[in-house]
Image: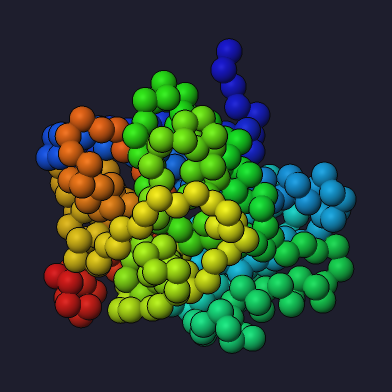
Amino acid sequence: MDIKHGFVDAVGNTPLIRLNSFSEETGCEILGKAEFLNPGGSVKDRAALYIIQEAEKAGTLQPGGTVVEGTAGNTGIGLAHICNAKGYKCLIIIPDTQSQEKIDLLRTLGAEVRTVPAVPYRDANNYVKLSGRLASEMENAIWANQFDNLANRRAHYETTGREIWEQTDGKIDAWVAATGTGGTYAGVAMFLKDQNPQVRCLVADPMGSGLYSYVKTGTITLEGSSITEGIGNSRITANMEGAPIDDAIQIDDPTAIKVVYQLLQKDGLFMGGSVGINVGAAVALAKQMGPGHTIVTVLCDGGSRYQSRLYNPQWLAEKGLA
């Protein structure tokens, strides 16, 4: 009998899906790690689980305690699920620019949710810094600190990267993924490079983020903006420090939207906006490398969390993206 013991035991071991329309279009095997099939609905379940488990092992999170985090949504959703499963309380600080679906879901899951204005990281009231201050003022509480807590990338080194290597029988030429905290990209890249240094590892980056310019020039500069949520950054997080990066690919919003609608209409996959950046970058890389290569990316979450925006023709028209 193959039975998972509760929510926690069901995290991970997601399938690797061939993206047929893009694979046929490029002549490469473009594969998506189906992280939207985690029990909490996103790749962030893995980091949330490791962060809580490591706090338990360290003794910093005691029974009945509170997990506090500043998040664009998916990490908070994963934390809220796991807190329910383990008997903890959950306090989430989220920018008011995030989709209403994610904010509503967090509250449905029982988390205390505080929305705050979206301000740059350098601002003392940035949602990440604010969550850290609040946690420090509470008893029996931890700050998940997903951006700089290395439990995040350890989750992906020990699970996601290993799974991808095993699922491809080691026949993988490239890994490409966008980064928010950097945990998924870095953990997988570090594992794959340890298995085969010839695997190319590339950062996918939306407009408005500084990572593309950092990889290309060594300097973080911000240009443009993006409707995608939870990815891109204006700094190098602790999770990204020391991570292998061979190159970077920048994807704009019109390309990302074309990709998510093609995934829906030709592949039957209802995906979130960051998947458009990831798969868009995988397709661009496939065209650079030429036919016959195997390229893996991550299908972070599903489209239902963005239905009022990404899949709303009126909203897209208002953004000039119809």
Q: Residue 294's spot in the image, x, y percent?
A: 29, 33
Colour mode of the rendering:
rainbow
Residue furthest top in the image: 1
The quarter holding residue 287 reads top left
Q: Is residue 24 above or below residue 3?
A: below
Q: Residue 126's spot in the image, x, y percent?
A: 58, 81
Q: Is residue 63 above or below residue 143?
A: above
User: Residue visible at 39% across and 69% down?
Assistant: 217
Q: Quadrant of the N terminus?
A: top right
For residue 25, side relative to residue 103 (left or right)? left
Q: Is residue 302 visible?
A: no
Q: Is residue 272 above or below residue 56?
A: below
User: Residue visible at 50% across and 49% down?
Assistant: 244
Q: Nearer the viewer, residue 112 or 181?
A: 181
Q: Quadrant of the C terminus?
A: bottom left
Q: Residue 161's spot in the image, x, y percent?
A: 51, 36
Q: Nearer the viewer, residue 49 or 174?
A: 174
User: Residue visible at 47% across and 24% down?
Assistant: 166
